[in-house]
Amino acid sequence: MTRQMGLLREYKLFILVFAVSALVFMPFLGEHWIHDSYLIARYGYFYMIPRLINQGRVVSSLFLRGLDAVSMPYVAAMSLSVALSLFILSLAAYFVYLTAKERGVSGKMVSAIALIGSAGMFFNLFVAETFLFFENAVMSLGALCAVLAARAILRGKYAPAFVLAVLSVFCYQAAIAYFLPLVLLFPAEPRKKIMAFAVYAFALVSNYVFTRMVSTDVRVSGSINLCENIRNCYFKVRSFFGSTLGMTPRFLFFLFIFSFAVIILVGAVKSKRIWPVVRAVLACGALVVCAMLPHVMMS
């Protein structure tokens, strides 16, 4: 009975995250337009499908094919996709929080911080940009698959992890960036960490091979200049941490992160719990690297 009440309480937290996210991002549920929207409105869903396949986003192409099959009006499709995204990302946040609880997070204050952090991973200004695209529901599905793949690794279920990771990159390549940081963030045996790198590499390579075989898009079918791409990624990361791409005063974001890190480090030293901090730093570093890797492999 106690376990059932605990599960009910966790489900209520999922509903809370979904309700708050729907309230905050409600404007996206209405009509909104970007370049792709105008193309679909003018030429239909099928106009975008070959482009998505060329870019290795096969699940997105199937999603648009489904919208075309039911002849859904494009304005209604905008709202449907965002509503699905909010639900799917709420699930992703819920599963991250559930993983934290399973891995030893306890106490009301710490649990509240874990819940806010889990939700913040998926509901922020940077992720909100994806709500502008027609296929944003599939992008969100990619994030959920990455989270579930990480949970599968932590549980020692490697076959489902491979499948979910591959599905994640075929939804949206950048979504797999959630996978490695989550595995590194939570305590697990070394063999599971090693397997996570293998799963991550296999997913990226499988999508890369597919796009090289079928694509006529210059972004993925042309030659790759690794040195130039790495150089561009370096400047992007520097710009992000230096001025958040021009959205904040110079180095304000970096100073905020540095101050926050010092507070956490002092607390860790006092409590003699250094290893969780090390895992968090590794996870943050892995997140930056994972986010940049797809750009490194572009033409």
Image (tube, helix red, strand yellow):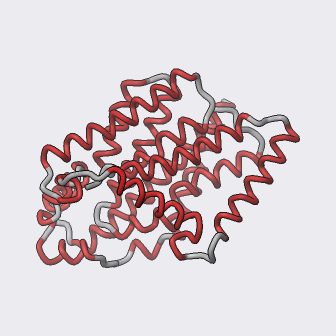
Using residue 62 as the reference point, say whether residue 229 is left or right of it: right
Residue 195: % across, % down: 45, 26
Q: Tell which of 173 and 288 is nearer to you.
A: 288
Q: Residue at x 35, y 57 (%)?
A: 228
On screen, 173 above or below 19? above
On screen, 131 above or below 91? below
Q: Residue at x 44, y 55 (%)?
A: 87
- How many numbered marks are there? 0
Q: Residue at x 15, y 51 (%)?
A: 215
Q: Residue at x 58, y 22 (%)?
A: 189
On screen, 270 above or below 65? above
Residue projecting furthest to the front? 227
On screen, 228 above or below 211? below
> Which quadrant of the rendered structure holds the C terminus?
bottom left
Residue 277: % across, % down: 71, 41
The answer to whether residue 5 of the structure is visible from this angle is no
Residue 38: % across, % down: 22, 78
Q: Tell which of 124 and 280 is nearer to you.
A: 280
Kindly indicate the quadrant of the structure image that contains residue 218: bottom left
The answer to whether residue 164 of the structure is visible from this angle is yes
Q: Tell which of 112 and 213 is nearer to you.
A: 213
Q: Tell which of 89 and 176 is nearer to you.
A: 176
Kindly indicate the quadrant of the structure image that contains residue 166: top left
Residue 219: % across, % down: 23, 58
Using residue 109 as the reference point, say whether residue 180 is left or right of it: left
Using residue 9 as the reference point, say whether residue 67 is left or right of it: left
> Which quadrant of the rendered structure holds the N terminus?
top right
Using residue 94 as the reference point, say whether residue 157 is left or right of it: left
